[in-house]
Image (cartoon, grey):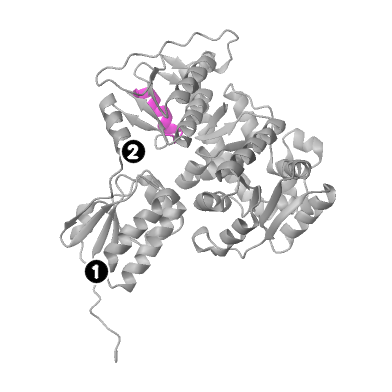
Amino acid sequence: MRKLLVILGVPIDNLTMAEALDRCDQFIAEGRATGRLHQIATVNADFVVNALHDPELRRILQEADMATADGMPLVWASRLLGGPLPGRVTGADMVPALAERAARRGYSIFFLGAREGVAAKAAAILQERYPGFKVAGVLSPPPRSVLEMDRSIVETVKAAQPDILLVAFGNPKQEKWIRMYAHELRVPIAIGVGGTFDMIVGVTKRAPLWMQRSGLEWVYRLIQEPRRLWKRYVHDFVYFGYFFFRQWWAMQRGSALSMVPNPEPAPMPPPSEPAAPTMPWPVLSVGHRLDVHNLDSFRQEAYRLLSEQPYLILDLSQTRFLDSSALGALIALAKQARSKDGDLFLLNVQEPILRMLDLLKLDRFFERFPDLSAIADRITQEQNPVPASSLTTHGWTIMSAPRLFDAATATVFLNEASAKLDRGERVIIDCSGTTFMASAGMAALVKLDRLARESNSAIRLAGCSHDVLRTLQLVRLDQVLQIFPDVTAATTAPLPDTSVTTEGA
């Protein structure tokens, strides 16, 4: 049962290094049995700030199987939010600890990324330090964007069959690459480790232990690399400080008492009886507030219900306050439900909670519905999916993009759209229902755009939400793809004039 604390929309696991390593053992056992990849992120303030501006990274961190506090600002923030983390669990500490455990338990580790020679040297140092440690492979590909990276990297990792994959591409590239190929790699654990290989080798030196424990390691790193780091640290300090103050103030306005754990948890109200229509899925009433006072009893009941059904509906019609730990519990429940091909639905969300979800950028993570009938319709759609429909307007074929345009949906959509382009149809992709655009989805769009040009056809995007448009802008696809505010604009805009040909052609 995960215990999470939400800091600026990013859930952080409340655990120690020993607990993190034990969870890695569980991930490896499950991954070996099922082939499922578990993504681990070691989160610092820079991750959080990047996630504020990068919807794809934010969603990846929200859905990570484990996210540890790599930086002291997160530990300090957790104390102010009333859910103190026990301390940092850094990538620089976790990698050697995993190597030691791997040597004892027979796990193998693949080292991917960093500059040429650095990963190989880091692997050799750990092999010498921990006799019996198995290195599944080492690869340092040339630096490229996620969408341009050679697919042979995936095949190399798959052939090596490691238990743990360490990816040192830097944030957010490493997190996006792992998410993009998670369904193919069949590696139990993948961890983005940033500059950890450089620290093991000694290219980057770690601060003395007393500075690490007192939260001053950033000062030591700044002294080492002032030109590279000072702008980033100033940027992170300003943005993290400003947005964290807004979260802290919102929590204080909810109730200052909610910041202090109550040794006597308040009893949780029993589940409410749903109104018509009768639902085969459990509906759990949250009550006026959910915080550290009554979170344990709520969590136990919610997980009990999820053990019986893959779907869980939370009735928030009376709820006026959720603290950071409660929001973390909701994220963990959603993750648990989705791992069983179910989901967590929020019913009758009131204005104070809507504002909080919007502030912490969780409004796209949770599915919110005004009534039970709408939830019943959504579940029916999920359990009985129908092929993507399309219609023709003004000579354009309109296709609806997937709600989650990621690796799980991109291939099917790519094949369907490609078939239409091959027949000479001009295609508009309606993204009005898309809440998340991942790198896999963008890779599919790039392929479709290339195919449209080669077949003398056309492809356009329409109805992109702010988050989807921002995701496309971050990789400059807005300069490549034709994007329109809505389907009407996309169908009526004239095609570019291609009548002018090169002289002599």
Res 480 visible = no
Residue 176 relative to residue 461: left or right: right
Magenta part of the chain: 349-362
Residue 32 relative to residue 422: left or right: right
Residue 38 relative to residue 319: left or right: right
Is residue 215 part of the magenta span, yes or no? no
Give the farthest residue toward the front: 33
* Residue placed most toward the observer, 73 or 454: 454
Dot 1: what SS? loop
Dot 2: what SS? helix
Is residue 360 part of the magenta span, yes or no? yes
Give the farthest residue toward the bottom: 504
The image position of residue 65, as x and y in percent, is 56, 38
The residue that label 2 is drawn on is: 382
Viewport quadrant of the C terminus = bottom left
Q: Is residue 333 above or below residue 401?
A: above
Residue 54 relative to residue 5: left or right: left
Name the residue rendered at 36%, 58% in the picture. Answer: 414
Residue type, numbered disc 2: Glu
Residue type, numbered disc 1: Gly
Q: Is residue 81 above or below residue 501?
A: above
The residue that label 1 is drawn on is: 424
Q: Kindly report the distance in space between the C-alpha atoms of the residues bearing marks 2 and 1.
A: 31 Å
- Which picture quadrant has residue 398? bottom left
